[in-house]
Image: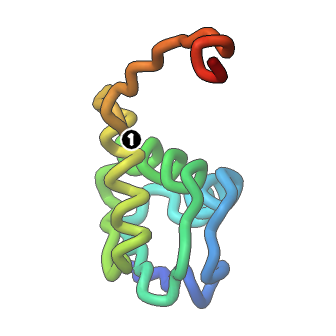
């Protein structure tokens, strides 16, 4: 049997702590679960990171019903975990202040 957990209703619409994932992990144990983001408005980078690390160790977890900002945060963190750069490299050049004001 698969348990569905409505994260927005059962925890909060804003998920911003690694500890929340740890509490979920304790609740889930080895059960197969669906984490439903339907009522979640926002997740922090740290929550997303901890969740994806947990999910990589526990294949019995499925994520569903993410709004675009939640999906984007998970995508950015997943790319970071895979070693991909989040942003293009910015080349910074130094200038003397005198060359700017004269």
Q: Secondary structure at mark 1?
A: helix
Q: Determine the residue positioned at 38% across, 34% down.
A: 81
Is residue 31 placed above or below 11 in the rendered structure? above
Q: Determine the residue positioned at 67% across, 15% down.
A: 97
Looking at the picture, how far across and down is residue 61, in whole percent?
A: 35, 62
Q: Which quadrant, please, contains the N terminus? A: bottom left
Looking at the picture, how far across and down is residue 37, in whole percent?
A: 44, 79
Q: Which quadrant, please, contains the C terminus? A: top right
Give neighbour class at mark 1: few <14, some 14-19, many 20+ (Cα, 10 Å).
Answer: few
Regarding residue 1, the answer to whether it shows in the image is no
Image coloring type = rainbow
Is residue 92 placed above or below 4 in the rendered structure? above
Quadrant in the rendering for residue 12: bottom right
Quadrant in the rendering for residue 9: bottom right
Circle 1 is placed at which residue position? 57
Regarding residue 39, the answer to whether it shows in the image is yes
Q: Determine the residue positioned at 52% across, 81% down.
A: 40
Farthest residue in the front direction?
A: 102
- How many numbered circles are shown? 1
Q: Determine the residue positioned at 41% across, 80% down.
A: 36
Is residue 43 placed above or below 49 in the rendered structure? below
The foreground one among 50 and 73 is 73
Looking at the picture, how far across and down is residue 54, in whole percent?
A: 46, 47
The foreground one among 55 and 102 is 102
Quadrant in the rendering for residue 44: bottom right
Looking at the picture, how far across and down is residue 78, in whole percent?
A: 34, 44
Is residue 51 placed above or below 71 in the rendered structure? above
């Amino acid at each position: 049997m698969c348990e569905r957990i409505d994260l927005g209703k059962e925890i909060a619409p804003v998920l911003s702590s690694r500890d929340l994932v740890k509490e979920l992990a304790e609740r889930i144990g080895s059960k197969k679960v669906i984490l439903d983001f339907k009522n979640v408005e926002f997740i922090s980078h740290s929550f997303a990171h901890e969740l994806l690390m947990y999910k990589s160790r526990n294949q019995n977890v499925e994520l569903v019903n993410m709004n675009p900002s939640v999906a984007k945060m998970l995508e950015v963190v997943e790319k970071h975990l895979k070693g991909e750069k989040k942003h293009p490299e910015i080349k910074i050049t130094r200038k003397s202040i005198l060359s700017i004001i004269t």
